[in-house]
Image (tube, helix red, strand yellow):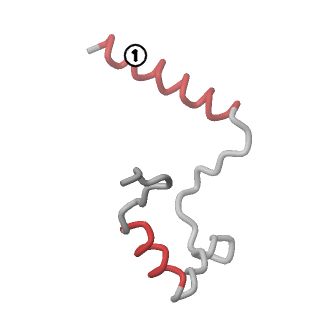
Amino acid sequence: MFKILLGFLVFAALALYILSRGGDIDMSGEKHGVESHEPAASAPGGAAPAASSAASAPAQQANPAPK
């Protein structure tokens, strides 16, 4: 039991040391205020269906075999 406690304390001290040396690390949790980022704007309605249909279409050969 003593070895487990000692191992945990060493691991916790090492983790705190690494985090303190890491620079500007925000450990305060989620932010729900003005500082939070807004979600990215969605793509225009016409562009998304065209891109998805082009992606699902089968690939065409660049140089078809001669008949």
Q: Residues within 10 Å of mark 1 (few under 14, many from 20)?
A: few
User: So how many labels did they put on this image?
Assistant: 1
Image coordinates of residue 21 in percent, x first then y, are 70, 30
Image coordinates of residue 15 in percent, x first then y, are 54, 28
Q: In the depicted view, which residue is nearer to us: 8 or 50?
A: 50
Residue 23, above or below 3: below
Residue 25, above or below 55: above
Residue that appears at 42% across and 66% down: 55
Going by the numbered disc 1, the residue's amino acid type is Gly
Q: In the depicted view, which residue is nearer to us: 49 or 10?
A: 49
Residue that appears at 40% across and 15% down: 6
Q: Quadrant of residue 36?
A: bottom right
Query: Which residue ends up furthest to the top in the rendered image?
Result: 3
Image coordinates of residue 63 in percent, x first then y, are 48, 52
Q: Quadrant of the N terminus?
A: top left
Residue 59, above or below 26: below
Query: Which residue ends up furthest to the front in the rendered image?
Result: 67
Residue 52, above or below 7: below
Q: Quadrant of the C terminus?
A: bottom left
Helix, strand, or loop for circle 1?
helix
Image coordinates of residue 9 in percent, x first then y, are 45, 22
Q: Quadrant of residue 18?
A: top right
Query: Which residue ends up furthest to the left in the rendered image?
Result: 1
Residue that appears at 69% across and 35% down: 22
Q: Which residue is mark 1?
A: 7
Left or right of 56 in this view: 26: right
